[in-house]
Image: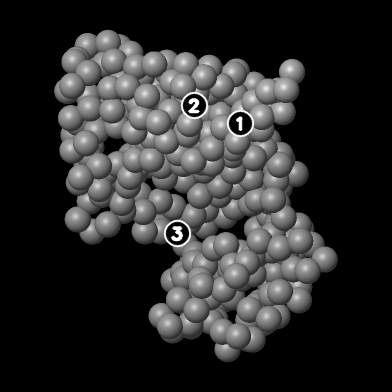
Amino acid sequence: MSHAPSHASCCASLRQTLLHGWQQTFPLHASPFRQMAALSGATPRELLSLCQELHRHGALQAIQPCWGEGLRRQRWRFAFEPGDDGAHLAAALAALPGCFRIERAAPRAGMPPLWAEIEALDEAALARQLRRLPAAPMARLPLPASSARALPCDDPEMASYLEEGLALCSRPFAHCSRLLGCSESRLLAKLQAWRRGGQLAGLALKPPPSRVPQPGLLALWRGARPTSRSLAGLRARSGVDHVVSGHGTPAWPWQLSLVLRAAPQLASDQLREVVAHAGLAMPDASARLLIVQPRDQALLFRVAD
């Protein structure tokens, strides 16, 4: 009995390590849980057992790839006018494998109520996903997603298996390689090559995104022309979640948009402070948001209709 408090404390510490410690640094090793156990002070069996328990209860995802800037892909920001069926459209967006961000704005004149961001390997893959929606976007803007020197994936089948999530077992790469019909050493060599080339940032063992919508505020400017220095200053400000510089064209009529992560009672004051610091006029339109993250990154290789 005298050892119970110490054991409970150790278990709690191990849970925190699992939930925060391997966000992009899951070992690319034939026996990853042995390496992780050596760093956490647990035995491999204890560590794996706790991972499996957390996964069963939805607190931990399977082992996931985190794609890097060296993987060629496209990212788009969309605005929608869904009419009275906003909830249905938001659900359809959340079901798209490439959609990783949805924003629902409070009703305001001159501001679309629904916004989303989607990544896809190319425009054809994007078009296949947009065809699944009950309404087409009313505005769209391409955003940078990969570096100018990014390369296409040289093994989409392997990438697709990785996006399904590696099994939480003592030898997850051996398990995946059997499904792929290749050797474990070939799989690990490919992952190491992708990481060296920047196509893979790493593998992650982490919790799923929160299902609770996060409060924020969206501000839109049609005539603002911020300098690159102003944009950099905005992005560096505390509480600024998203800054998008647009073209001011019919396809995307806003030259600047800004999303703040802010509690509703603080959002307006925070916006005024950020705008004043950047030397901007107040926005043409602004509204409170609920920000939803259907997944922590786009599933680029789950492309079947």
Classify mark 1: helix, strand or loop: helix
Give percent across and percent down for residue 255.
Answer: 50, 74
Cβ–Cβ under 8 Å for marks 2 and 1: yes
Relative placement, left or right, of 250 versus 239 is left
Of mark 2 and mark 1, the one earlier in the sequence is 1
| Amino acid type of the residue that numbered disc 2 sits on in the rendered structure | Ala
Looking at the image, is mark 1 or mark 3 nearer the viewer?
1
Which one is nearer the viewer's eye here, 191 or 76?
191
Residue 167 position (above or below residue 190): above
Q: In front here: 215 or 252?
A: 215
Residue ID at (19%, 15%): 182
Q: Counting other residues with Cα less than 10 Å from the Cα at mark 3, is it few (<14), some (14-19), or many (20 or more)?
A: some
Which residue matches tag 3? 141
- Name the mark nearer the viewer: 2 or 3: 2
* Residue 42 circle label: 2
Q: Name the residue furthest right.
A: 265
Q: Which residue is mark 1?
A: 10
Q: Residue at x 72, y 22 (%)?
A: 2
